[in-house]
Image: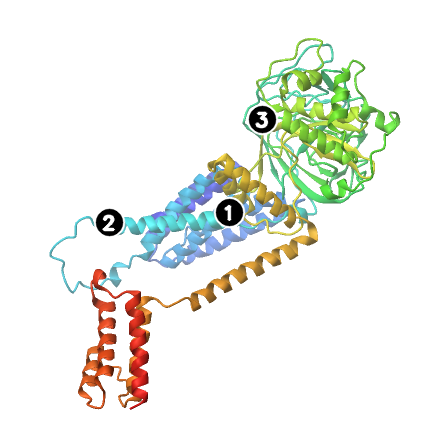
């Protein structure tokens, strides 16, 4: 048992050390001293360890003082995690030197659980499950060993088994059951373990990566690709370089991106992580027409306010995101739409008029930064009620978002007119174009490069109708601009995949993406993604506990369900969730569902109470009525009598006529056969009806005695 506890503690220590938040000296000392401590405590388990206890108290005092000294320099709760983890670590190590009894070992197991929880709070990937599994195995071994009695508690055997039982597998089953229970409990506790909502933190986490590399401040530079140009040279994708993260987005670029994780995002809900905005299209390239950058001004909370970030006039939902960078990225910050405040480890941040934020350093591995955004949360029903479109002037602010190349074929404009012909307002036109693209085009990473001199969007719309997300988004931008609707291209990353155990979004190179933002004069810019759709902004009610696990399980089940069934169920689910998410309608809907469920349960219980009795119940009812009739004839019920003894009493009473005796004999015979006869010989429903009729006749005859 002591070995199992020591193993569980060592696994907990390793799980924390593996998260790279402790110094090398602290990690090495803890991993070496913990097993030494358990060896010492075992050898001295029967001794008076006063001096050891005093030394441990002094060590705990030093560890606490060191923690308080480190916490004084912490500027955010996120930065306090490492000192707190170190404190838990030293408490565990010091306790290892004084565990003489079983109850002390139990405390060590509780402490190891704390260490596993600390490691889980620091973990950023599902690989932490291996530590959790190893700890669960050690815990199961401890549970099994602790359930066994001590040698002194075992009494001498009172009998001896003379023949062994073959195939005895009880110990194996016991260990397996304990291990399964421990693993299920550990995974469940880890999955629902509460974390402090980052939206409640005043100072958000940020950290400089070691060896940060400077980057140009006047342009975006992608360290994985050559510098983009506008002289006709095509810069294709590399496995770690997306050409959309530069000053030029070339629709002729081709290639495949890696599935390696780029960064992880801690956030309540996922969004499109926008980086750059392009407004000028020449038939192949998207570029930025304005290069003027404004500095971000520091605020009292340790962050930097984004200039012109309050230009959205509709409802929004505050979203706090913390980015943990795993792979080097360009000198542009990623974040949800309408960024308001940035917490970044370096100054000299700059932003352009489209809220694209430049950094003076590359986003290197290990860098951490946070962003506060006001994500647009306008409902489609509100957009649909806007007044009819009015053509905006093709000059001033709107000009660069309505620009189209002079060489754009007329058939592209004609197609735009055809698609939006029935639209009543701007929202109707936007949804018509998006729906047409989703129905008539295909996302395809194998499409060949366009021929020289050919407009990429025109070729996509009328020839291939297959392309990258850049082609689909560009087609939407061109078609909407042809209708006088200001539109711009945005590049960044998709929301990624939510890790069900850490709650973080794992964003990969292959999640690099392009979409559009459409300008509504009454509101501001709203994102649309004709390729995959914009992630929904959740409503204000509902618990996030376990949401990651539920989403993951739903996705796994969805993958195993046939497409037809999934489509039908998905359509019904979207209708239901659409009603639920409709603000105030959500509460009445939930109440109606609960009332309906209670009504169904009540009806089922009522039916269960009022359904006809079974055959056995009807024979018992007939026998009970026979006893009631005999009580009327002067023979009160005697619980000790069997049915045959009751029949003997009837036959012995000369006052009872032959008809009553015959009916009594029929009832007793039916009851006996219903209970004890072979299935083929048991009485039928018709026999039960006759027995009930006979019992009624016995009552009538007894009443007239």
Identify whether 214 is placed above or below 152: above
Q: Which mark is residue 510?
A: 3
Residue 182 is at least partly visible in this image = yes
Residue drawn where x is 76% and y is 36% of the image: 427
Between 661 and 625, which is closer to the camera in this rendering? 661
Between 418 and 442, which is closer to the camera in this rendering? 418
C-alpha span from label 1 to label 2: 33 Å
Between 221 and 469, which is closer to the camera in this rendering? 469
Report which residue position mark 2 lands on. Answer: 169
Residue 642 is at least partly visible in this image = no
C-alpha span from label 1 to label 3: 27 Å
The kind of secondary structure element at disc 1 is helix
Q: Looking at the image, tell me whether mark 2 or mark 3 is earlier in sequence order.
A: 2
Q: Looking at the image, tell me whether mark 1 or mark 2 is earlier in sequence order.
A: 2
Q: Which mark is residue 191?
A: 1
Identify whether 37 is placed above or below 531: below
Residue drawn where x is 51% and y is 47% of the image: 191
Residue 408 point in image, percent of width and height: 77, 16
The kind of secondary structure element at disc 2 is loop
Residue 515 point in image, percent of width and height: 69, 28
Query: Relative to residue 166, is residue 584 drawn left or right?
Result: right
Identify whether 258 is placed above or below 642: above
Query: Relative to residue 348, is residue 28 drawn left or right?
Result: left
The kind of secondary structure element at disc 3 is helix
Q: Looking at the image, tell me whether mark 1 or mark 3 is earlier in sequence order.
A: 1
* Label 2: how many Cα within 10 Å (few below 14, some 14–19, many 20+): few
* Label 3: how many Cα within 10 Å (few below 14, some 14–19, many 20+): many
Residue 117 point in image, percent of width and height: 50, 48
Tell me, yes or no, whether the two marked residues, 1 and 3, touch with CB atoms within 8 Å.
Answer: no
């Amino acid at each position: 048992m002591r070995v199992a506890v020591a193993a569980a503690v060592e696994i907990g220590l390793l799980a924390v050390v593996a998260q790279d938040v402790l110094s090398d000296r602290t990690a090495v000392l803890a991993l070496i001293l913990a097993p030494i401590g358990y060896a010492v405590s075992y050898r001295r388990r029967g001794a008076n360890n006063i001096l050891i206890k005093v030394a441990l108290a002094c060590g705990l005092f030093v560890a606490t003082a060191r923690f308080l000294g480190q916490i004084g320099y912490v500027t955010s709760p996120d930065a306090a995690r490492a000192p707190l983890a170190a404190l838990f670590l030293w408490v565990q190590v010091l306790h290892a030197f004084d565990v003489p009894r079983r109850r002390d070992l139990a405390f060590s197991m509780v402490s190891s659980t704390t260490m596993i929880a600390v490691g889980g709070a620091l973990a950023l990937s599902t690989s932490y499950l291996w530590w959790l599994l190893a700890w669960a195995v050690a815990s199961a071994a401890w549970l099994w060993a602790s359930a066994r009695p001590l040698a002194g508690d075992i009494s001498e055997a009172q009998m001896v088994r003379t023949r062994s039982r073959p195939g005895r597998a009880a110990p194996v089953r016991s260990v397996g059951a304990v291990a399964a229970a421990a693993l299920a409990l550990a995974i469940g506790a880890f999955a629902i373990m509460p974390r402090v909502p980052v939206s409640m933190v005043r100072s958000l986490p940020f950290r400089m990566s070691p060896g940060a590399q400077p980057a140009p401040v006047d342009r975006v530079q992608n360290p994985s690709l050559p510098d983009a140009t506008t002289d006709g040279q095509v810069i294709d994708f590399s496995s770690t370089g997306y050409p959309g993260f530069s000053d030029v987005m070339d629709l002729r670029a081709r290639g495949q991106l890696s599935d390696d994780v780029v960064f992880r995002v801690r956030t309540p809900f996922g969004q499109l992580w926008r980086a750059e905005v392009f407004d000028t299209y020449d038939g192949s390239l998207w570029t930025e027409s304005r290069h003027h950058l404004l500095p971000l001004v520091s605020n009292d909370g340790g962050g930097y306010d984004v200039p012109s970030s309050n230009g959205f006039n509709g409802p929004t939902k505050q979203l706090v995101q913390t980015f943990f960078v795993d792979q080097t990225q360009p000198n542009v910050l990623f974040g949800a739409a309408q960024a308001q405040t940035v917490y970044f480890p370096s100054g000299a941040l700059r932003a352009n008029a489209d809220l694209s934020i430049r950094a003076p350093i590359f986003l290197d591995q290990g860098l951490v930064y946070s962003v506060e955004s006001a994500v647009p949360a306008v409902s489609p029903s509100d957009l649909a009620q806007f007044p009819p479109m009015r053509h905006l002037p093709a000059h001033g602010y709107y000009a660069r978002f309505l620009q189209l190349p002079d060489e754009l074929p007329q058939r592209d404009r004609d197609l735009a007119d055809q698609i939006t012909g029935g639209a009543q307002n701007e929202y109707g036109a936007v949804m018509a174009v998006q729906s047409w693209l989703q129905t008539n085009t295909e996302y395809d990473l194998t499409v060949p490069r366009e021929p020289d001199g050919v407009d990429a969007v025109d070729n996509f719309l009328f020839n291939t109708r297959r392309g990258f997300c850049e082609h689909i988004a560009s087609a939407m931008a061109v078609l909407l601009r042809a209708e006088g609707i200001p539109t711009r291209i945005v590049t960044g990353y998709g929301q990624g995949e939510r890790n069900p155990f850490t709650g973080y979004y794992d964003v990969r190179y292959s999640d690099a993406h392009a979409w559009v933002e459409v300008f509504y004069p009454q509101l501001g810019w709203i994102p649309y993604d004709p390729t995959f759709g914009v992630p929904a902004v959740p409503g204000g009610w509902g618990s996030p506990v376990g949401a990651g696990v539920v989403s993951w399980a739903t996705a796994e089940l969805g993958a195993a369900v046939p497409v037809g069934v999934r489509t039908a169920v998905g359509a019904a689910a979207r209708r239901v969730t659409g009603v639920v998410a409709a603000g105030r309608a959500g509460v009445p809907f939930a109440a109606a569902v609960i009332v309906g469920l209670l009504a169904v349960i009540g009806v089922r219980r009522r039916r269960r109470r009022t359904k006809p009795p079974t055959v056995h119940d009807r024979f018992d009812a007939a026998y009970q009525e026979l006893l009631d009739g005999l009580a009327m004839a002067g023979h009160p019920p005697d619980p000790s009598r069997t049915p045959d003894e009751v029949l003997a009493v009837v036959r012995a009473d000369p006052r009872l006529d032959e008809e009553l005796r015959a009916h009594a004999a029929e009832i007793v015979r039916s009851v006996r056969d219903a209970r004890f006869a072979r299935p083929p010989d048991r009485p039928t429903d018709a026999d039960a009806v006759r027995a009930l009729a006979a019992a009624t006749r016995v009552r009538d005859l007894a009443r007239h005695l």
